[in-house]
Image: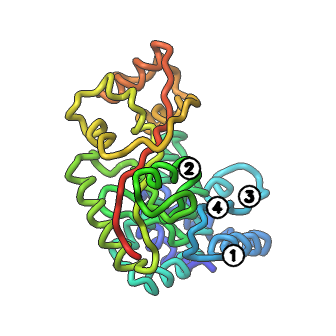
Amino acid sequence: MLPDTDELAVVLLDLGVPHEDIDDLVRMGRRVTDDPELRQFLERSVGALVEGMGEVGGPVELPRLDWASGALRRCFPVYVFVAALPRTRAYHRERGIPADVSRRTLADLGRNMAVHRRRYGRPGVQAPRWLTRHFRGELYQLGRLQFERARLGQRTGAGPAAAGLDVGPGSLCLNLHIPDFHGPLSPAAVDRSLALAGEFFARHFPRERYRAVTCHSWLLDPQLRQYLPADSNIVRFQERFRVAHEDTEPADTEPVQFVFGDPELPLERLPRRTAVERAVGDHLRAGGHWHIGHGWLPFDAGG
């Protein structure tokens, strides 16, 4: 189910896998293909990943490899995604997904591994469950942002319905995600991504009606406005969204993870180099908490 040695290296590069991880992954790939138990587990994992390809249902849980901890266990999801790649690309072709959108979307595997290496200093896949969205045809990178085919929840769906949109809980929506390592979140970049999304989903998913975009992120915590200037990219991003509902549960590790790369960094060690770093760290050091914000904005694509 895996490409041969030479082709595997090329495929990994196409998926954005960090160069320093390629040789080890190719070496361990031979072990996967030579071991009957690992091959069988790989086949079962790929089957779980591609079942219901293209359905809007959220991420799937990949089977957990019952193997000694180490590089192979940390990296095994890479082989699952590589083995599933022909099915994913075939689905993209059926939908007429442009090759550049497909490539940039699936290269999130490499970004995810870069996040893992930044945090732990060794190869691994940071969030395999997150990546199942990409390889099942549910999520696409369109410019600066990612858009996931999803459905409105009970609380999030109430806002658009109350605002007069012909949608509500259970209706299709697009979940907006903001990936790491992709430049600033400038208003122009966000405008471009939203425009691309409107065209993309109307063309490639014409039978699916999208009337709302949702975002669930610490970047929508209104407390950030106490620390950042009104013309900052984050504040201007927040201003696009209407509040769906408020979340009072502390989520302090979210900004620490995304801003500093490690959610377990001690507060006293958080750098203060940028306005965002100062905002996140100073707020926590003062005894405050950060929360996940939940927002939505009207949209029009498909249907």
Mark 1: amino acid: Gly
Name the residue nearer the viewer: 19 or 135: 135
Residue 64: assigned label? 3
Q: Residue at x 50, y 53 (%)?
A: 113
Spatial separation of the CA atoms under disc 1 and disc 3 = 14 Å
From this viewpoint, is residue 124 visible? no
Give the mark, 3 or 4, whose residue is nearer the N terminus.
Answer: 3
| Residue 200: image location, x then y, percent | 34, 73
| Residue 245: image location, x then y, percent | 50, 40
Name the residue nearer the viewer: 104 or 284: 284
Q: Quadrant of the N terminus?
A: bottom right
| Residue behind mark 4 | 76
Question: Would you say 145 lies left or right of 82 here?
Answer: left
Spatial separation of the CA atoms under disc 2 and disc 1 = 21 Å
Q: Nearer the viewer, mark 2 or mark 1?
A: 1
Residue 47: assigned label? 1
